[in-house]
Image (cartoon, rainbow, N blue to C red):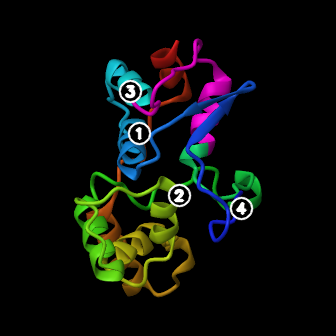
Amino acid sequence: MINLLYESLPNSITVGDKDFLINTDFKYWIELSDALNNQDCDKTYLTNVILNLFVDEIPNQFNSEVFIAIKKFFDGNIETKDINESNEDCNIKNRIYDFKVDGDYFIAAFLQNYNIDLLKCDMHWFKFMALFHGLKDCELKQRMYYRSVNLATISDKKERSRIRKIQNKLKLDQKTISDEDIAQALW
């Protein structure tokens, strides 16, 4: 994890002992997210999305080390904990946002909060994610909140019913592309 306040933002991933320059603009990484979150994603398309992450030189072999390096960059500047430590109540981490489904709300949120037009700017993925995590209350944050509510924790039946209706309206497909499909696209 780097300190964004004084350390340079990375522009490469390291595979073995070699650094590979990558496209750091958030749009490339959102496209990767969309591909990974689409179980019906064409393997050729996924391969092209991954190859487009590299600026000039592409690793000779796509192995687990390449995938881990890409995943580490994709996760951004966030320390990830073991899912068992951070999510004791459930085994599956529910998605609470989707760049494709919530795209309009991302655009509006960045305009409202930061006066940044995502359609007209280039921005490093880590900076994008830092700004995303710092968003104030807005429609996007509300949508994320309702998707994240555990109905079992709400004792009032009317409130639970109200939130269930909202969740059904805002529900995201929880199916994502498997690691095996990603491996097949790369090898």
Distance (Cα) linking label 2 and label 4: 22 Å
Asked whether the viewer can see residue 71, the reply is: yes
Numbered badge on residue 62: none
Numbered badge on residue 32: 1
Please tell me whether mark 2 or mark 4 is closer to you in this view: 2
Please tell me whether mark 4 or mark 1 is closer to you in this view: 1
Which sits earlier in the primary sequence, circle 2 or circle 1?
1
Other residues around mark 1 within 10 Å, as few (<14) / some (14–19) / many (≥20): many
**Identity, as a three-letter code, of the amino acid under mark 4:** Ser
Numbered badge on residue 86: 4
Task: Give the x, y percent position of residue 48.
Answer: 36, 24
Left or right of residue 171, residue 1 in this image = right
**Identity, as a three-letter code, of the amino acid under mark 2:** Phe
Distance (Cα) linking label 3 and label 4: 30 Å
User: Which secondary structure lies at badge 2?
Assistant: helix
Distance (Cα) linking label 4 and label 1: 25 Å
Which quadrant: the N terminus?
Answer: bottom right
Other residues around mark 3 within 10 Å, as few (<14) / some (14–19) / many (≥20): many
**Identity, as a three-letter code, of the amino acid under mark 1:** Leu
Which residue corresponds to mark 2?
126
Left or right of residue 67, residue 164 in this image = left
Which residue corresponds to mark 3?
46
Which sits earlier in the primary sequence, circle 3 or circle 4?
3
Q: Is residue 136 above or below residue 122?
A: below
Distance (Cα) linking label 2 and label 1: 15 Å
The residue positioned 63% from the left and 18% from the top of the image is 63
Which sits earlier in the primary sequence, circle 2 or circle 4?
4
Q: Nearer the viewer, residue 151 or 55?
A: 55
Which sits earlier in the primary sequence, circle 4 or circle 1?
1
Instruction: Write down the region rendered in magenta.
Output: 52-72
Q: Quadrant of residue 142?
A: bottom left
User: Which secondary structure lies at badge 4?
Assistant: helix
